[in-house]
């Protein structure tokens, strides 16, 4: 395979002369017609300060055309004639519009990846109905207020990135036709409602709903049909409770629901036995259900910045956990069972809690000291029901 990649030295020498407005800008037009570029399978023109593409771009026979991080404000109609192109990346430019002549993109029948992300001036994306082979589509950080027409016809689509479009306040119902979708990113779109048809996306593995305006009543029951979901992100919404449907997603490995208004977690959360990472930071939790100890595969647990005053003894069941963040809560005691996690737990952050068990001189020594202290003093602490300070004083006397 012949691949054209610009190395760092070539890139530095070419940046100042790749713009067609520059003195030597005409070189790009002639180069695109020559075999130097024309017959390459990958044409990489990223970070070249190109502000305009010549019509000769339509003569390329490449499979990948990479134009990211330039100064393009528009695309020539000839780019729509690239019938061999499978990957087109025009991300991180300043594209304001796409010419009417290439709206249908009817000749780009081989296209499997289209990356338009981070073109903030772009408010309209043409119909994509003809791109039936498309597997990855990124329309992140534009100014669109609705999805491009024809997205519902892209039955081969596996990844759809629509994050950071604050004017995109809803997702059309026909998204439910994308049955092969595996990753859906809806971060930062000011959405208030998730359509029921999302339940049709049975192959979805990652769903990002962070930084929207979702209420508990606006998350449909059909979410529970996403049986293959492995990562669900709900942080930064307006949820006062964890949707009941979430606790039926037994294949979940990562669950994020930080920066909401949760006051409690349901007992059913213990059903999510495949979880390896949870983040419930910055909510209003006051305790954790005993069933949370059933999450035996958990490795990372973040509960910082809540109002938790009591922890269940079942946390000793987290035999695989390596990091627990309980900082900025209202804990006065840690459960003795955390001492059973010696050897696996490497980070235990309990800062900014009014702890007496363990006492502060132990807490400030860090994770290892805390875990060892809990393990060493568990029997005496349970028996005598004495404060952490008294146990510490007894230890000092023995020395």
Image (spheres, rainbow, N blue to C red):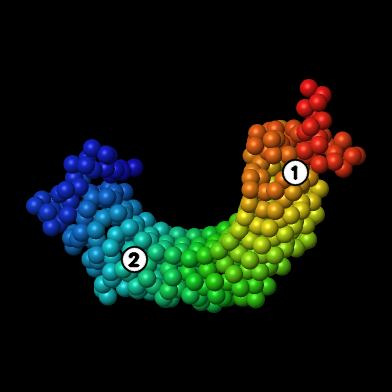
Residue located beneath label 1 in the image: 356
- Relative horizontal placement of residue 54, taking residue 67 as reference (left or right): left
Across and down, in percent, residue 20 comes to 14, 57
* First of labels 1, 2 by sequence position: 2
Rendered view: 53 above or below 146: above
Across and down, in percent, residue 61 comes to 27, 54
Question: Residue at (63%, 61%) from the top-left corner?
Answer: 283
- Relative horizontal placement of residue 173, taking residue 375 as reference (left or right): left
For the view shown, which residue lies furthest in the left direction? 23
For the view shown, which residue lies furthest in the top direction? 399
Q: Quadrant of residue 7?
A: top left
Residue located beneath label 2 in the image: 120
Q: Nearer the viewer, residue 131 or 89?
A: 89
Mark 2 element type:
loop
Across and down, in percent, residue 48 comes to 23, 50
Q: Quadrant of residue 267?
A: bottom right
């Amino acid at each position: 395979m012949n691949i054209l990649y610009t190395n760092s030295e070539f890139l530095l020498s070419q940046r100042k002369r790749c713009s067609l407005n520059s003195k030597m800008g005409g070189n790009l037009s002639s180069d695109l017609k020559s075999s130097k570029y024309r017959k390459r399978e990958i044409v990489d023109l990223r970070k070249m300060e190109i502000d305009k593409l010549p019509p000769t771009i339509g003569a390329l026979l490449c499979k990948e055309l990479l134009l990211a991080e330039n100064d393009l404000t528009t695309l020539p109609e000839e780019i729509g004639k690239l019938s061999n192109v499978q990957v087109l990346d025009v991300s991180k430019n300043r594209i304001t519009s796409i010419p009417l002549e290439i709206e249908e993109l009817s000749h780009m029948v081989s296209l499997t990846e289209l990356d338009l992300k981070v073109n903030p001036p772009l408010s309209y994306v043409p119909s994509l109905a003809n791109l039936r082979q498309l597997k990855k589509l990124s329309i992140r950080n534009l100014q669109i207020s609705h999805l491009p027409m024809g997205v519902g016809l892209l039955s081969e689509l596996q990844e759809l990135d629509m994050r950071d479009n604050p004017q995109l306040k809803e997702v059309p119902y026909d998204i439910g036709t994308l049955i092969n979708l595996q990753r859906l990113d809806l971060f930062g779109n000011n959405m208030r409602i998730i359509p029921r048809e999302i339940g049709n996306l049975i192959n979805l593995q990652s769903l990002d709903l962070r930084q929207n305006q979702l209420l508990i009543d606006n998350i449909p029951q059909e979410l529970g049909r996403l049986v293959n979901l492995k990562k669900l992100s709900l942080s930064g919404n307006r949820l006062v409770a964890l949707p009941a449907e979430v606790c039926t997603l037994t294949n979940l490995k990562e669950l994020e629901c930080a920066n909401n208004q949760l006051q409690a977690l349901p007992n059913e959360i213990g059903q999510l036995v495949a979880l390896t990472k949870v983040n419930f930071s910055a909510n209003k939790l006051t305790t954790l259900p005993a069933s949370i100890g059933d999450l035996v595969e958990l490795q990372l647990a973040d509960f910082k910045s809540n109002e938790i005053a009591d922890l269940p003894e079942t946390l000793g069941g987290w035999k695989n956990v390596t990091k627990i963040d309980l900082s900025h809560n209202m804990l006065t005691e840690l459960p003795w069972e955390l001492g059973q996690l010696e050897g696996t737990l490497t980070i235990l952050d309990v800062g900014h809690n009014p702890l007496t068990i363990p006492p502060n001189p132990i807490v400030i020594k860090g994770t290892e000291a805390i875990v060892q202290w809990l393990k060493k003093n568990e029997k005496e602490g349970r028996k005598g029901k004495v404060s952490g300070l008294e146990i510490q004083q007894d230890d000092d006397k023995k020395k």
